[in-house]
């Protein structure tokens, strides 16, 4: 699992930084941790050491990171694409991620169903719904959502990102059936319930929880270095 995820992160790094981050690395992602020399050359020595250590302690519960967010919120997009996803790629052996796309949306019951108003308008409601359906339909949801959120246009990127990471069982038509149908509304209702049940109640987005808990200290540490926070909290 780790090698494909590292490949995704590599592509993203090259896109964001013009390829300079791994310019001296001549090894494919699957071999980055194969030797001390390759780990140093590819700049992932610390991560390789961490990975080798954690693989021998799989009986320990992973750190649970929750993100309550909105699909078009600039700060949410930055945290998800620049911090949360790269950290998960490197530490998915010891951390799990729960995404709840809803944030500051408002839910209104109408004729035994629900309608939603979103902070950044109808397009954000659409983005929230697409990502909610993805989370219910595929194990590749997080890489697809990362692909969307790190793009220049979240909504326009959705279909190409699904086609890039999808499968014969996951098609754009299937996703849009969920988005436009009762299934999507019921799934979004669950997101509303989860968000409204937060204790303390969320006051902004992105809102981060660690093992179900939110404090300003945990939020600040997650925003500055989630990697350090997860590693420091992982008990062996």
Image (cartoon, grey):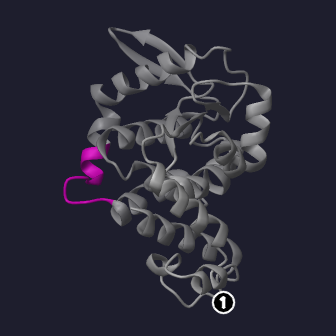
Q: Is residue 122 in sight in this rendering?
A: yes
What is the span of residues highlighted in magenta in the rendered image?
166-175
Q: Is residue 148 above or below residue 135?
A: below
Q: Position of residue 11 (x, y in %)?
A: 54, 74
Q: Which residue is mark 1?
A: 24
- Above or below residue 40? Residue 102 is above
Left or right of 167: which side holds 67?
Answer: right
Q: Quadrant of the C terminus?
A: top right
Label 1: how many Cα within 10 Å (few below 14, some 14–19, many 20+): few
Percent from the top left, x then y, of residue 39?
60, 79
- By secondary structure, the bulk of the magenta-drawn segment is best described as loop
Q: 73 or 91: nearer the eye?
A: 91
Q: Give the image location of residue 64, x and y in percent.
A: 54, 36
Q: Please indicate whether residue 52 sits to the left or right of residue 79 in the image.
A: left
Q: Is residue 82 above or below residue 175?
A: below
Q: Residue furthest left?
A: 168
- Classify the position of the N terminus by image quarter: bottom left
Side of 178 relative to 115 (left or right): left
Q: Between residues 31 and 50, which one lies in front from this camera angle?
A: 50
The residue depicted at 60 percent of the width and 28 percent of the height is 103
Relative to 48, is 169 on the left or the right? left
The reply to whether residue 156 is in sight is no
Residue drawn 46% across the image and 64% down it: 5
The x and y percentages for residue 155 are: 50, 51
Q: Nearer the viewer, residue 56 or 84?
A: 56
Task: Specify whether residue 129 is painted magenta.
Answer: no
Residue at the image point whose x is 48% and y is 59% from the top: 157
Of 81 and 7, nearer the camera is 7
- Mark 1: secondary structure: loop
């Amino acid at each position: 699992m780790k090698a494909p995820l590292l490949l995704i992160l590599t592509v993203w790094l090259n896109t964001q930084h013009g390829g300079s981050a791994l310019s001296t690395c001549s090894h494919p992602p699957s071999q980055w941790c194969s030797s001390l020399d390759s780990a140093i050359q590819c700049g992932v020595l610390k991560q390789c050491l961490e990975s080798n250590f954690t693989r021998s302690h799989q009986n320990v519960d992973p750190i649970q990171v929750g993100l309550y967010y909105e699909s078009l919120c600039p700060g949410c997009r930055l945290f998800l694409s620049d911090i949360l996803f790269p950290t998960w790629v490197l530490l998915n052996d010891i951390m799990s991620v729960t995404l709840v796309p809803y944030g500051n949306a408002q839910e209104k019951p109408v004729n035994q169903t629900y309608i939603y108003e979103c902070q950044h308008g109808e397009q954000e409601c659409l983005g929230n719904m697409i990502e909610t359906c993805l989370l219910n339909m595929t194990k590749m949801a997080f890489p697809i959502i990362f692909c969307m959120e790190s793009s220049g246009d979240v909504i326009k990127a959705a279909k190409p990102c699904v086609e890039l990471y999808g499968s014969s069982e996951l098609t754009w038509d299937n996703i849009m059936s969920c988005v436009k149908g009762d299934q999507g509304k019921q799934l979004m209702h669950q997101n509303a319930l989860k968000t409204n049940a937060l204790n303390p109640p969320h006051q902004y987005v992105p809102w981060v929880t660690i093992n179900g808990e939110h404090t300003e200290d945990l939020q600040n540490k997650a925003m500055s270095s989630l990697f350090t926070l997860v590693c420091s909290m992982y008990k062996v």
